[in-house]
Image: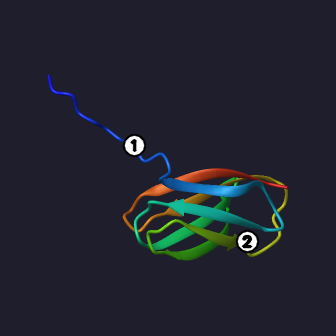
Amino acid sequence: SPVARVSFNAQSGITIYPNPVRDNRYHLKMTGQPEGEYRVTTYSSDGQRVCCNTLQYNGAEAIKTVVLQSKLPQGLYKVEIRKPDGGITVINVLVE
C-alpha cells in the first residue's frame, strides 16, 4: 500500500499559566484555535460558577489575561473555555 505522510501540529491548543494561579489572574496561551469570541468560565470544585469572562481571539498565537472578579479561596478550580465553533476545553487550575 502507498505511504501517506501525516503531520500533527503539536503547538495547537490552549494552556493556562501560571498554574498554580497567584494574584487573582492567569493567562491563556492560545495557538491555532478558531477565530471569534471565547467564553471563559471558572468553577469551584463544588460546581459553583465564580467568574465568567469573554475574550476575542483573531486566530494567531496570543496570550490573553483573565482577571478573576473576586479573591478566590485556595483550592482546585475548573476553567471551561467555550470556543466559537462549539468546542469546549476544560483545564484544572490550583489557586494559591
Using the rendered view, name the quadrant where residue 48 is placed. Answer: bottom right
Instruction: Where is residue 58? Give x, y as percent.
Output: 45, 74
Q: Is residue 86 left or right of residue 55?
A: left
Instruction: Where is residue 17? Give x, y as percent.
Output: 70, 57
Instruction: Where is residue 24? Give x, y as percent.
Output: 80, 68
Instruction: Where is residue 56? Give x, y as percent.
Output: 50, 77
Label 1: element kind: loop
What residue is rendered at 73% in x and 71% in y?
A: 68
Viewer-proximal residue among 45 and 19: 19
Please name the residue that numbered disc 2 is placed on.
68
Please name the residue that numbered disc 1 is placed on.
8
Q: Which of marks 2 and 1 is in front?
A: 1
Quadrant of the rendering where the N terminus is positioned:
top left
Quadrant of the rendering where the C terminus is positioned:
bottom right
What residue is rendered at 62% in x and 71% in y?
A: 64
Amino acid at pointer 1: Phe
Viewer-proximal residue among 23 and 7: 7
What residue is rendered at 47% in x and 57% in y?
A: 88
Of callouts 2 and 1, which one flags the residue occurring earlier in the amino acid sequence?
1
Amino acid at pointer 2: Leu
> Residue extending furthest top?
1
